[in-house]
Amino acid sequence: MEIKRTLLPSEKLKPLYDDALKLKFGVNFTDYMFTMSYNQEQGWHSAEIKPYQPLMLDPAASVFHYGQEVFEGQKAYKSKRDEILLFRPQENAKRFNASSRRLSMPEIPVEDYLYYVDELVKLEERWIPTQKGASLYIRPTGIATEPALGVKASKEYLFFVITCPVGPYYSTGFDPVSLCVCKTYSRAGSGGTGDAKAGGNYGASHIATRDAIAKGYNQVLWLDACERRYVEEVGAMNIFFIIDHQLVTPPLTGTILPGITRKSLLELAPDLEIEPVERLVSIDELVEGIESGRVTEIFGVGTAAIISPVGKINYNEKEYIINNNQTGPWAQKLFDTLTGIQTGEIEDKHGWVHVVK
Ligand SMILES: *Cc1c(COP(=O)(O)O)cnc(C)c1O
């Protein structure tokens, strides 16, 4: 689909950051944004790249009242050969559509989605950091815009893409996080929206994070909503364990977000000679395993941090320390391998890296 472009004279472009390694996550936006509208008569139309600017929305727009909103999170890297690399962007496009279907929102053809993201990233090339661990974060978003308060799916939508350069999640090496098991709230219930990247999931989870922080922990360890027994996710990341020398993660049962980092680590495991296992892990198995030494590592995984080692877990007011509160060898190896592939430094045997041309 054709993109209308409104470009700025070079003197109107924003000044670049001084040091990409010091950039905070998600606060420094680039010069341009992509937008595209949807209505029932025209379908998706008016694809545009224009200067980054506020949106004009009717206060009755359904996103404000009934929460039809979905998003994606991706990263662009600069390789040593000065290429722009995206990591498995087709997976983001497909997941954007899966989230949209769940929220009764219109899908975007995968090829179109990929083209729009590529075109915006190409235009913003100067913003892509070259420093190790830094990247250009990409946030494609869909919202319902029909100005109507009737409780029903909107007939009009807006898709937009914004980008921001981000520093490494860990500026001074890994810093293991501490978790508090949440027994008051659930993140996702069976048949709900836990497997969609929908804004509402996050709005409802901050209260639990606040409680964890008040108790002196960094993040929430979420259990299943039904039995409060099986471990599901950590904060807004998928969770992995090293148990009996296997790489274990909970299966995608509908309440877990199907992470692309998660999927990639499972596919990478055989290359690194560790067996990947998808199975339920109860909180009791976990704390017993930490005490007995069967569980040697725990880490969260997702696009923002890639890998986030877990050093401590509070469960029933008792604290369990994992691997001496240090980053374990598997967290380090998986991090090095995956980020090496993403930045073009390690051979991409799986065909995951997309070179933006
Ligand atoms: C985005 C997200 C993840 C990680 O997905 P990636 O594709 O690996 O970035 C995990 N859990 C939740 C709740 C998420 O929103």
Image (spheres, rainbow, N blue to C red):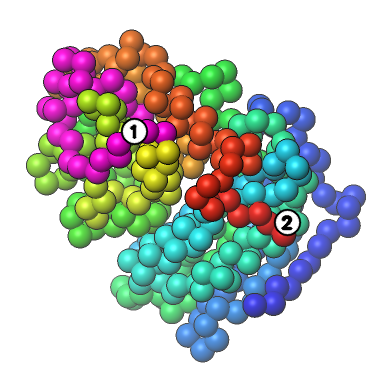
Q: Residue furthest top?
A: 324
Residue 276 on the magenta span: yes
Q: Which type of secondary structure does the marked residue at label 1 adopt?
A: loop
Please give left or right for residue 130 compared with residue 11 in the image: left
- Residue 3 location in percent, x, y? 70, 73
Q: Which type of secondary structure does the marked residue at label 2 adopt?
A: helix
Question: In the image shown, does 115 or 47 lie closer to the viewer?
Answer: 115
Q: Residue at 24% across / 22% down in the picture? A: 295
Which kind of residue does numbered mark 1 sit on?
A: Ile
Q: Residue at 27% across / 26% down in the picture? A: 245
Residue 278 falls in image quadrant:
top left
Asked if residue 89 is positioned above or below residue 319 in the image, the reply reads: below
Q: Which residue is mark 1?
A: 274
Quarter placement of the N terminus: bottom right
Which kind of residue does numbered mark 2 sit on?
A: Lys
- Residue 289 location in percent, x, y? 17, 21
Q: Which residue is mark 2?
A: 122
Residue 225 falls in image quadrant:
top left
* Mark 2 → mark 1, Cα distance in angstroms: 37 Å
